[in-house]
Image: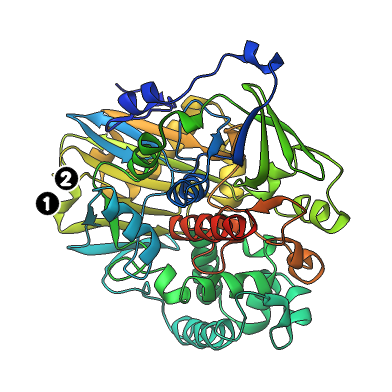
């Protein structure tokens, strides 16, 4: 296949899982609400984790998922011979203990990201091979970047994970963008480019989009900017055999008919004795509810009574990042023969960075390219053929003419996904932590909030999603 593929797929046992889940006809919406202890909105890692913990504690649950699949922002895609790649979240690092523990309990193994060989730095029209974490810059740019990195590292550790706005100079940090911080703390083009690159890689957003306080909180939440931008030993250390979506698939298999697909939640009504969750698949009455979706999506549900102003204001101010993932499939990972590991950074559009995303067997070869932030927003406005040509031109420039001839080019634009509206994660622009941050995790009556955006540790990552589900389940169990 040579056309760009946009089909969503559940693989690695997903067919059996989907068959075991409840596909409730919309006609049943007219029936009286079914009764459970806890209703959960969203069958991503957060919602499925919360449901699993509550069921283990002896409570009845239902998980309502808008899509026709489970996994949220994790999604597998077949590439032939029973192998898959992930078009959503995929990597895990050694410090991300909660997602790793869940995976082990479900029999999902990990394998290392391919790192043997040289990396490519495409900067100012010149391709340079290098090793190590930081691409080679000329002086004085290299020294300028190193001092700025040191400044970031010294500040990030001072941001409290539970109440970031209480950090020293928290109001000042939250009153500026990370772009303003970058400009005030660097002097050279090279240093500024690497900060841009790191920001785009970690947030799928531009430094101008983010509160400086949020950037520092996020780095600290993930054990530091160095860990988050590292491959071996860092946040991109490993992947899951069978794809990251397999974790959600197996969680859902264990929950069985408690998971209801094609059930977008439209309305949540709170009363003195409980809540009623109204969806396209019917209504459920529960003692408590967990909303385990991104704040931007949670704000699109109709609440009765209306949410408090601070919580409603929060949902209006936490946009999702912008990313399009491209996976070019080849018979073999040919770049390895040239002594390259598939990792590249570039200052030329549209692809800013690449990875070797081949399955554990090494066949087929898969080259993963990220288009993020402003570049993703601009590229999405172009035609399919124009996008394809631009992406393959980036691959060919970095890895040679063979890279322009994949057997398949998979595209997934998360901003166009109606029940996600962007990836990797929702982020805080200036002022949001200071004025609305207290509402992020605080329950509203019988409503509790989960999702990776609510995590204190590894916010934005699969590990953070699991941690948020565990926290929300514990909150609810304590109230039941």
Real-space Cα separation, disc 2 to disc 1, in angstroms: 6 Å
Instruction: In the displayed orientation, state which residue is furthest to the top.
Output: 27
- Kindly indicate the quadrant of the structure image that contains residue 274: top right
Q: Is residue 408 above or below residue 177?
A: above
Mark 2 is surrounded, within 10 Å at the Cα level, by few (under 14), some (14 to 19) or many (20 or more) other residues, namely some
- Up the image or down, 394 lies above or below 465; here it is above
Residue at 76% from the left image edge and 54% from the top image edge: 444
- Residue 166: percent from left, percent from top: 72, 82
- Is residue 319 in view from this perspective? no
Crowdedness near tag 1: few (<14), some (14–19) or many (≥20) residues, C-alpha within 10 Å: few
Question: Which mark is drawn over residue 3?
Answer: none
- Indicate the secondary structure of the residue bearing disc 1: helix
- Towards the viewer: 332 or 245: 245
Q: Which residue is mark 1?
A: 337
Q: Is residue 335 above or below residue 207?
A: above
Secondary structure beneath dot 2 equals: helix
Whether residue 31 is visible to the viewer of this picture, yes or no, is: yes
Residue 407 in the image, given as x and y percentages of width and height: 25, 28
The colour scheme used to paint the residues is: rainbow
x, y percent for residue 120? 31, 61
Residue at the spot x=39%, y=47% of the render?
Answer: 369
Residue drawn 36% across and 75% down? 136
Report if the CB atoms under discs 2 and 1 are less than 8 Å apart: yes
Residue 334 shows which numbered tag? 2
Residue at figure coordinates x 37%, y 74% from the top left: 134
Where's residue 38, x and y in %?
60, 43
Instruction: Write down the quadrant of residue 41 in the picture.
Output: top right
* Residue 279 found in image quarter: top right
Residue 164 or residue 205, whichever sits in front: 164
Image quadrant holding the N terminus, namely top left
């Amino acid at each position: 296949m040579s056309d760009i593929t946009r089909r969503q797929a559940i693989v690695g046992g997903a067919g059996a899982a989907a068959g075991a889940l409840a596909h409730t006809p919309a006609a049943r919406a007219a029936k009286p609400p079914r009764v459970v202890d806890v209703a959960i909105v969203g069958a991503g890692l957060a919602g499925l984790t919360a449901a699993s913990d509550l069921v283990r504690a002896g409570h009845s649950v239902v998980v309502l998922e808008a899509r026709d699949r489970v996994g949220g922002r994790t999604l597998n895609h077949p590439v032939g011979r029973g192998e898959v790649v992930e078009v959503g979240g995929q990597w895990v690092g050694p410090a991300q203990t909660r997602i790793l523990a869940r995976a082990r309990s479900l029999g999902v193994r990990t394998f290392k990201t391919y790192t043997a060989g040289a990396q490519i730095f495409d900067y100012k029209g010149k391709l340079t091979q290098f090793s190590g974490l930081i691409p080679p810059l000329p002086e004085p740019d290299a020294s300028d970047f190193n001092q700025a990195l040191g400044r970031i590292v010294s500040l990030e550790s001072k941001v409290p994970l539970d109440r970031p706005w209480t950090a020293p100079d928290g109001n000042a940090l939250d009153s500026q963008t990370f772009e303003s911080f970058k400009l005030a703390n660097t002097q050279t083009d090279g240093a500024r480019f690497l900060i841009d690159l790191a920001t785009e890689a970690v947030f799928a957003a531009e430094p101008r989009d983010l509160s400086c306080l949020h950037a520092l909180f996020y780095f600290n939440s993930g054990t530091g900017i160095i860990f988050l931008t590292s491959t071996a030993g860092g946040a991109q250390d490993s992947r899951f055999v069978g794809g990251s979506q397999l974790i959600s698939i197996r969680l859902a298999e264990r929950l069985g008919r408690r998971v209801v697909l094609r059930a977008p939640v439209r309305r949540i009504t709170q009363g003195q004795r409980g809540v009623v969750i109204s969806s396209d698949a019917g209504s459920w009455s529960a003692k408590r509810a967990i909303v385990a979706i991104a704040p931007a999506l949670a704000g699109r549900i109709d609440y009765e009574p209306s949410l408090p102003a601070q919580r409603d204001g929060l949902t209006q101010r936490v946009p999702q990042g912008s990313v399009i993932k491209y996976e070019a499939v080849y018979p073999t990972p040919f770049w390895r023969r040239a002594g390259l590991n598939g990792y590249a950074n570039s200052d030329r559009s549209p692809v800013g960075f690449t990875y070797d995303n081949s399955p554990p067997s090494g066949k087929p070869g898969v080259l993963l390219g990220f288009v993020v932030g402003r570049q993703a927003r601009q590229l999405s406005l172009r035609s399919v053929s124009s996008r394809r040509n631009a992406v393959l031109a980036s691959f060919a420039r970095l890895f040679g003419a063979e890279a322009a001839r994949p057997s398949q080019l998979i595209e997934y634009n998360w901003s166009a996904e109606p029940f996600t509206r962007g990836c990797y994660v929702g982020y805080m622009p200036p002022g949001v932590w200071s004025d609305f941050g207290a509402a992020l995790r605080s329950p509203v009556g019988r409503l509790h909030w989960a999702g990776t955006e609510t995590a204190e540790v590894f916010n934005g990552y699969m590990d953070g999603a699991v941690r948020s589900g565990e926290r929300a389940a514990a909150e609810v169990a304590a109230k039941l």
